[in-house]
Image: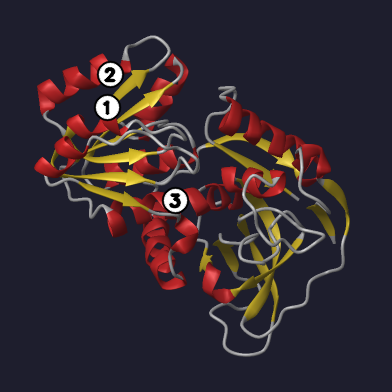
Amino acid sequence: MKAAFLNQTGPADVIQYADLPDPVAGPGQVIVRTEAMAVNPIDVYLRSGAVTADLPMPYIPGCDLAGTVVDKGEGFSRFQVGERVWGSNQGLAGRQGTFCELCCVDEQWLYPVPDGVDAATAAAVSLTGITAHLGLFLHADLQPGERVFVNGGTGGVGSAVVQLVAAAGGHVTTTVGSDDKAAQAISLGATDVINYRSTDVAARLAELVAQAGPFNVWFETLRNPQPETTIPLLAKRGRYILMAGRDARPEFPVGPFYVNDLRAIGFAMFNASSDEQRVSAIQLNALLAAGKLKGHIGAEFPLAEAAAAHQLQEDNTLHGAGTLSGKIVIRP
């Protein structure tokens, strides 16, 4: 099979494109012929070595995939040959990733693709959709009518948060970097959108809080969170959700935090059990089938250009290039 892989961590150009042996399904595993994959920031961290992990070499990167089951191993399987599936969690915990024509996946990490949903959409909402759902519902216990803030409403996780909050009957405020992205965020369901390049974000947030009240949930996606700014904007018993900022060490205003009964919750999607992630996937599938969740795709690359796709993700995740809106999808 053709695959994008690396034999050592480093810059994007360590990714090669060549033939690797076809995988063989073990017990409880299936072989998926991939139709679409997506790129995530964690892929960049693992490939670059910024996040230390025991990677099998050659290592195939990629967490997300959508495709068709073409073979399965011994034992019970939820899926039959010919079924369309999507999933995430590949490329982690010693597993090979998805940037290949044939991917061997434990059945616990796969879910059916709803009728009428294309592979690119399914792949694009995989990791980001599960992440957003876990944060909003498992950890923040979002309720209808609550007010949510999320940075980056047209990014991968941010666009998923916007759509999930809107579908749940909440009100979501978000930031974007251009007028075009503002229009995109509104189309996804954002109630209020702040262009951080042309507007004083802190002043505008203060205005919104004065007009409509403080936020019940703050979903932090930035690598450098600012709790000193965030905490005064939260309602009593508000929830401060942290899923980014691996190296951040900001000052934390303890007084305003505890006197308002606030909660700070940190989580990483890949720490959630397969059962917890399946609950999220079932809900995401219902929204996909109803047309209430869309894959916000900003760029597409062929598998042969996986290195270029990684470079684009790195430029935007680590260097603030602002040249990407939504997810990067790769097709074999």
Nearest the eye: 263 or 124: 263
**In whole angstroms, how far apart are the C-alphas of marks 3 and 2?**
28 Å
- The reply to whether callout 1 and callout 2 are in contact (CB within 8 Å) is yes
Residue 294 against residue 181 in the figure, above or below? below
Of marks 1 and 2, the one in the foreground: 1
In x, y percent, where is residue 159?
42, 38
In x, y percent, where is residue 266?
36, 51
Q: Residues within 10 Å of mark 1 (few under 14, many from 20)?
A: few
Q: Residue at x 71, y 34 (%)?
A: 311
Q: Quadrant of residue 59?
A: bottom right
Nearest the eye: 213 or 253: 253
Q: Which mark is residue 129?
A: 3
**In whole angstroms, how far apart are the C-alphas of marks 1 and 2?**
8 Å
Q: Is residue 254 left or right of residue 261?
A: right
Q: Quadrant of residue 190?
A: top left
Residue beneath label 1, please? Answer: 229
- Identify which amino acid the numbered label 2 is placed on: Ala
Residue 307 against residue 116 in the figure, above or below? above
Residue beneath label 2, please? Answer: 202
- The reply to whether callout 1 and callout 3 are in contact (CB within 8 Å) is no
Residue 85 against residue 332 in the figure, above or below? below
